[in-house]
Image: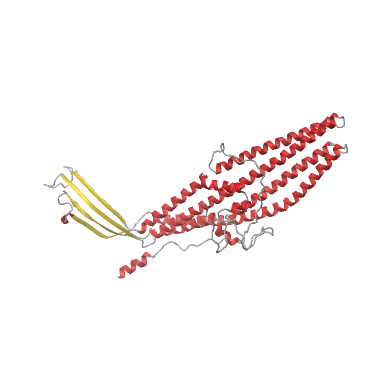
Amino acid sequence: MAAAHVLAVLAGCSLAPALVVPPIPAATSYKESGSWVAAQPADRLPRDRWWRLYGSAELDELERRLAEGNPTLAAALAHYAAAQALRDQARAGFYPNLALDASVTRQRDSAHQPLLGPGVPRYYDDNLLGGAVSYELDLWGRIRNEVAASAANAAAAQADLENARLSLAAQLADDYVQLRSLDRQSAILEDTASAYDRALNLTRQLHDGGIVAGLDVSQAQTQLASARAQLDGIRAQRALVEHAIGASLGVSASTFAVAPAIVILPVPPIPVGVPSTLLERRPDVAAAQRRMMAANAAIGVARAAYFPTLNLGASGGFQSSGFTNWLTAPSRYWAVGPQALLTAFDGGLRRAQVAQARAEFDAAAADYRAVAVAAFSQVEDGLAQLHHYGDALGQEEQAVAAARRSVELSTALYAQGAADYLTVVSSQAAYLQAQLQALALETARLRASVALIRALGGGWVAAGEPREAPES
């Protein structure tokens, strides 16, 4: 009884050190949050379909196709399945190992083998039917720590899968924002080219009437050709973004297309919460933390090598030189007993393995801290961009309105002969630049909102609220 009690106590031992999570410098609030975030305590982002905040059924359909066809996501899913299999392999160490053996052989021994006695047959049969069972007592927690490490790695792989989903979904949303922005740029340039074409016709009429010089016609032609060249450049950019979207869906760019359309996407209100909750939502932070836990358990595995392994084993069966008396009592054999193994000298191998495990834990802890600090920085980046791009957009919209009035006034004065054509050209160029700049700021703000949602770990639900079930 005393021996059994000692074994039970030893079986609960673990040589892994207590996990020490490195401190993360988290502030009480975000520096760049400002007053622009229109979030209430009940506000939430849908965790699995956060892109619906942008109100585009087309984007929702593209995201669905991404989840089904993206090869990177499929690879992440396969890596997760492999990590689960490794975890299950480690768990097999908790159970006994049972082996069965059966053989029917005809053998011939060498006539020149050592110590060959007289009368010993050189030809004989050897028929064997038996089995063996063995079980390692996990006295020092080696198996438990191997299971803990593999389970933590499986959890990290699952977090990697979620991070891949989040990153790919955010990249697709960002590409879609760019695509629709390019469509709007194309529309602005097409309208501008039409206006420049009308201005060219006006200068030609005035030139034919002898009112203006040919220089005005040349300037109008130059301006029209430049606008058309910009339009062609925008179309080239759109093609590249469209191809990128097709590739993310896992389809050939040659067979994929998104019809041009004027789509104005809203910038959704995003409840950012407090910094301390960020570490609970980011899948990449979770993956880094799980890998740190796996590395900590690996230290216990390495330290267990200093202690003996104890296996309980038994074997038995039937062995005979013929078939007639094979499965009978006299042909039985068996063996039972424990086996202990301790490495007495290894030239410093175990010491080096423990040092390696500790160093790998230190690296994993540093990686965890780096990922967490980067997460806070990315949130601050998104908040700052949303805040300042919003202010800049308000100013630029005023510039657009003023530039439009300038074009109308200068064109009217030129038609009356009260202004030269250089004034018209300058006002038209300023108006086009203001329009494009306003659209660029609007697009940058939309892209910043996507980046902020990604930095926040995607969508989330408030404490106590049920998580939305993923759609099939």
The answer to which of 353 and 452 lies nearer the viewer is 452
The answer to which of 454 and 378 lies nearer the viewer is 454
On-image quarter of the N terminus: bottom left
- Percent from the top left, x then y, of residue 294? 46, 57
Question: Seen in the image, is 278 located left or right of residue 311?
Answer: right
Q: Residue furthest bottom?
A: 2
- Percent from the top left, x then y, of residue 115? 16, 47
In the picture, residue 417 is in which quadrant? top right
Query: Does any portion of residue 161 appear in the rendered image?
Result: yes
Question: Seen in the image, is 139 located left or right of residue 188?
Answer: left
Residue that appears at 55% across and 44% down: 248
Query: Does any portion of residue 302 appear in the rendered image?
Result: no
The answer to which of 377 and 202 lies nearer the viewer is 202
Residue that appears at 60% across and 60% down: 275
- Percent from the top left, x then y, of residue 240? 61, 39
Total number of numbered discs in the rendering: 0
Question: Seen in the image, is 417 located left or right of residue 396?
Answer: right
- Percent from the top left, x then y, of residue 172? 59, 46
In this figure, which colouring scheme has been used for the structure? secondary structure
Residue that appears at 39% across and 64% down: 13
Q: Is residue 409 above or below residue 160?
A: above
